[in-house]
Amino acid sequence: MDTANDHAVRVLNSLIETTLDSANGYKEAAENAQSSQFGSMFAQRAARRAELVALLQQEVRTFGGSPETDQSLLGKAHNKFVELKTAIMGGDDRAVVNEVERGEDVIKAKYEAVLDDAELPPTARDLINRAYGAIKADHDEVSRLKRQLN
């Protein structure tokens, strides 16, 4: 039978995978952006997402679980697709921002899906709510940036 801790570990590990996908996506975007402004912004976001991963991993440990340390297979495939697309399109900043925004939609939706999970212990729910605030702010900023470029 599953305990609340087992459930928390599963949910948090799922969020860790998605957040690792995001951190790696931002790293790829930083490397492929033509503009140093975008490159710097994306590199900072990659670092912030890596910090969030560390917080989530620590929370998994508090529940006696083993934290996820690698991104999802889907995330890895998406990063490779972005690399290929960027190579074909010549690293156009608009294309990079479009891909970042698409990734932001995915992570935002993933966090929203677990925000109201009543089975999560309060400490996990609090961490997820704080993380969601940062993710939503980043999502909204990238969406504005996309609209400005398109």
Image: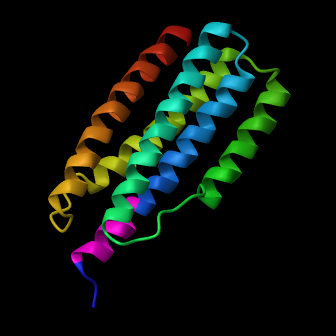
Residue at 75% across, 45% down: 80
Residue at 82% across, 20% down: 90
Tell me which corner region of the image, top left, top right, bottom left or bottom right, holds residue 72: bottom right
Specify how the rendered protein is coloured: rainbow
105 lies left or right of 30: left
Tell me which corner region of the image, top left, top right, bottom left or bottom right, holds residue 83: top right
**In which quadrant of the rendered image does the C terminus lie?**
top right
Q: Position of residue 55 (x, y in %)?
A: 39, 47
Please say whether residue 34 is one of the residues in the magenta stretch: no
Residue toward you, 123 or 38: 123
**In which quadrant of the rendered image does the N terminus lie?**
bottom left
Q: Position of residue 69 (x, y in %)?
A: 57, 58
Q: Position of residue 21 (x, y in %)?
A: 57, 47
Residue 136's place in the image compared with 34, above or below, is: below
Residue toward you, 116 or 58: 58
How many discs appear? 0
Residue 38's place in the image compared with 59, above or below, is: above
Q: Which residues are magenta?
A: 4-12
Residue 29's place in the image compared with 116, above or below, is: above
Does the magenta stretch mainly form a helix, a strand or a loop?
helix
Residue 120's place in the image compared with 20, above or below, is: below
Residue toward you, 17 or 52: 52
Q: Position of residue 49 (x, y in %)?
A: 48, 37
**Outermost residue toward the bottom?**
1
146 lies left or right of 56: right
112 lies left or right of 146: left
Residue at 69% across, 33% down: 28
Residue at 38% across, 64% down: 61
